[in-house]
Amino acid sequence: MTSIARIPDRLRFDEATPSPRPLVDGFRRRITYLRLSVTDRCDLRCAYCMPERMTFLPRREVLSLEELSELSTAFIARGVTKLRITGGEPLVRRDISDLFTALGRRIGDGLEELTLTTNATRLADHADTLAKAGVRRVNVSLDTLDRDRFAALTRRDALPQVLEGIAAAREAGLRVKLNTVALKGVNEDELRDLIAWAHGERHEVTLIEVMPLGDIEEERLDQYLPLDIVRKRLAKDWTLADSDHSSGGPASFVDIAETGGRLGFIAPHTNNFCANCNRLRVTATGQLYPCLGGGERVDLRAALRSNDPRGQLAEALDAAMIIKPERHHFRMDERGAAPALARHMSTTGG
């Protein structure tokens, strides 16, 4: 089998090749950030994300590691400087460390940052390899520090492994940012303590409003906790100062004087974050979604497997710029409503 560490010549852009034009959408937004899913599979079953009996994609439909590497190279050639590997849970993908090693070689050669989002259940086994590949920080999804609550929410008793993974990441020199979905009646009483713990461990935290993607077994409106309410509650105990920090993503930030840490808010419902969108998402099957909350898509797998992958990919990426919408249209105001989109977050790429 061809090593993915060696990018095929058919997709290599070198000094003899004119630089392809950057990715700019119809609203003059420069696209520099790609979230690339390597699998829709996950070893947890978070209640706000997927049903217990989740049906995953047939493996034959998922892009090979070689194709994922080729695709990443094409995006970097078009001006993508930040690449986040997502899932599902990316670390359940066999030989995923090979992909990180191959992509890490592009850091400083067009790529400025390589990172991932993980649930950290397997992070302890991969932290050193990720650091050696050039990863400098990871986002860890963590909604509670209570073991029983974690088991109920994720339908798996895996909190000890998650905490071990977070500790291993820090030991390997990786910065950790926690992503916490604020859930009404589930973890809202714990958010303050979770933030305080994280800042005490020198981790950043970002709170996220639940998003209406995919059918689940619970009523999402019952889970929805507006983050403006959370911020008002936190402000009763802490001094929150607006920060001009930017992560290159949709979060807004505050600094907390009492903890000495930074807190982010991703609020698609109460504070639409689309105006400066600079990102695209590609699923594990090679479907490019210009918007998390939209149904518009372009088939990159077909382009990759065509007789002219370079030309077909160039056309596909140009088409994505044309169809990228100005904003999403999530709604969270009607009980019993169908999800905004049928696809689950694990399918799109978290």
Image (cartoon, helix red, strand yellow):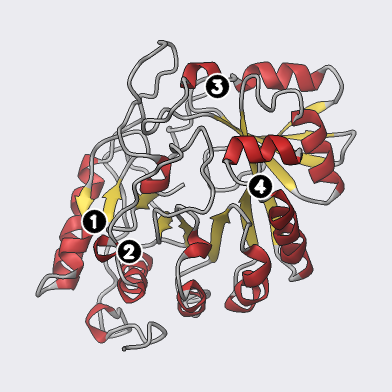
Q: Residues within 10 Å of mark 3 (few under 14, many from 20)?
A: many
Q: Which residue is mark 1?
A: 317
Give the answer, above or below, for where 125 lies relative to 331: below
Q: Which residue is mark 2?
A: 78
**Sooner in the amino-acid sequence: mark 4 or mark 1:** 4
In the depicted view, which residue is nearer to us: 190 or 9?
190
The reply to whether residue 233 is in sight is yes
How far apart marks 4 and 1 lie (CA) works out to 41 Å
Q: Which residue is mark 3?
A: 223
Q: Residues within 10 Å of mark 1 (few under 14, many from 20)?
A: some
Question: What amino acid is found at the position of numbered circle 4 in the picture?
Answer: Asp
Q: Which residue is mark 4?
A: 157
**Sooner in the amino-acid sequence: mark 2 or mark 4:** 2
**Sooner in the amino-acid sequence: mark 2 or mark 1:** 2
Q: Secondary structure at mark 1?
A: helix
| Residue 25 found in image quarter | top left
The reply to whether residue 252 is in sight is no
Q: Residues at badges 2 and 1 in contact (C-beta under 8 Å)? A: yes
Please provide percent x and percent y for residue 92.
Answer: 50, 63
Q: Residues at badges 4 and 1 in contact (C-beta under 8 Å)? A: no
